[in-house]
Amino acid sequence: MKSLFLSVALMLTSALSAQTKLWTLQECVDYAMQNNITLQKARLQQQSAKEDVSQSKAALLPSLNASTSHNFAYRPWQSSGITTVTNGTVNTKVEKTSYNGSYGLNASWTVWNGNRNRNQVKLNKLSEERADLEIQETANSIQEKIAQLYVQILYLIEAVKVDEASLETAKKNEDRGREMVDVGMMSKADLSQLTSQRSTDEYNIVSAKAQVSNYKLQLKQLLELKGSEEFDVAVPETTDNMAQEDVPTVMSVYEQALGIRPEIQNAEMAVKSSDISIDIAKAGRMPTVSLSASASTNTNSLANNGWGDQMKFNFNSGAGVNISVPIFDQRQTKTNVNKARIQRETNLLALQDQHKQLYQTIENYWLDATTNQQKFRAALATVESERQSYSLLQEQFQLGLTNIIELMNGKDKLLQAEQNCLQSKYMTILNLQMLKFYEGKIKYGL
């Protein structure tokens, strides 16, 4: 299966850990497409819609039913009976019990009912297609969520590395501060600030790791992995160039999305379904023509003839044409037609709303991509500037030429610049891939 986000997936390399499998983005999407419960429910709904199509097609054919009934009777006070003469001897037999059997075969066929049955086939076919589109909608939603969680995890993993590097620097500054206190070049109050800075960096690491675990848990739940299963993601090597790609225009993405997005196609089919529902409702004004045929026979144990003769002589068959013309139906047909037309107007509004929501979604991704790309470009220069500035401050601090406040401020500025750079970089990559996905340049398979 092709990855939802091909460009990002190309970055990912399959890796195995001795303890935990490392999941790439493509593996996450593939697994979710097969195991996500919401998606499985959507597939079952599509199968149900398919059965409705088969049933409505079968309704166009004649129906045939066989029936039989068997009854036993007991008349305890029966006095008269059957008299027979055998070899000159008259015998009278009184039957207090009797058996009766009947057998029938009935067929019927609706020849015409205002095309209600044929339109029902068309309506059910549209429902099946809409159910398939709903599967695609669900799949798209799941893949977008997976990508968002995955990129957020990658960003936080990199943020942890930045915090860990900052912690190492804070420890070195603290150690140097102790040495300066010992020789009288720094007060214990200044040393306590360095210690506080080191503790703050340790807290930041713990907090960032907790966020990573939370996002991994959400991703794991989306994949329907069991709680006992170990889970971790493969960390790719990202490049700054991935966040420097040209951002497509909103209209170019929107125009492409209109022809391929399943939610738009589903809304359009809802309007078509409304048109057919109107025709079905109007059929209530039309006559119904049907054919019927039947064949039956019966037997009785009290009859003089044998079972075979009774089946033959009691056989009866017939056929007929039935015509039903609606004259007054207490306004049911008119109400059904009006309600079907109201539903069509509702579906038209829903289609317009889907167009608006699609445009807003694309516009938001475009705005986020453009804004974060600009932030990233600015952050690159800021990080380099703050890194050089802090390196100079560290050298001056080692020589006792700058105070603790300037050093800590320089470190905070560098840390903030690095975090901003990472965040804007990953958010730019994510939103660029989202735009490509909506544009149809990245496809998926079920």
Image (cartoon, rainbow, N blue to C red):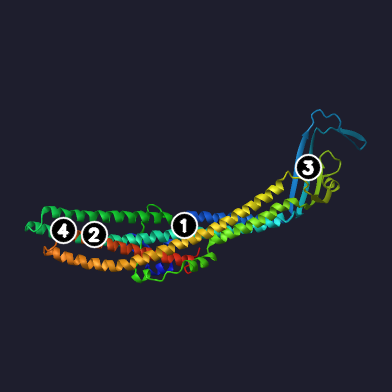
- Mark 1 or mark 4: whose residue is earlier in sequence: 1
Secondary structure type for disc 3: strand
Q: Is residue 443 visible?
A: no
Q: Residue at x 82, y 40 (%)?
A: 300
Q: Are marks 3 and 1 in contact (CB under 8 Å)?
A: no
Secondary structure type for disc 1: helix
According to the image, label 3 marks what residue? 101
Q: Is residue 206 visible?
A: yes
Residue 359 in percent (x, y) is at 49, 61
In the rendered view, does 176 fall on the left or right side of 336? left
Category of crowding for the residue at label 2, using alpha-carbon neighbours closer than 10 angstroms: few (below 14), some (14–19), many (at least 20): some
Secondary structure type for disc 2: helix
According to the image, label 2 marks what residue? 412
Residue 93 in percent (x, y) is at 85, 33
Q: Nearer the viewer, mark 3 or mark 1?
A: 1
Q: Residue furthest right?
A: 88
- Mark 2 or mark 1: whose residue is earlier in sequence: 1
Q: Amino acid at mark 1?
A: Asn
Q: CA distance from mark 3 to mark 1?
A: 56 Å
Category of crowding for the residue at label 4, using alpha-carbon neighbours closer than 10 angstroms: few (below 14), some (14–19), many (at least 20): some
- Mark 2 or mark 3: whose residue is earlier in sequence: 3
Q: CA distance from mark 4 to mark 2?
A: 12 Å
Q: CA distance from mark 1 to mark 4?
A: 55 Å
Q: Amino acid at mark 3?
A: Gly
Vertically, is 131 above or below 382?
Answer: above
According to the image, label 4 marks what residue? 404
Vertically, is 225 above or below 24?
Answer: above
- Mark 3 or mark 1: whose residue is earlier in sequence: 1
According to the image, label 1 marks what residue? 35
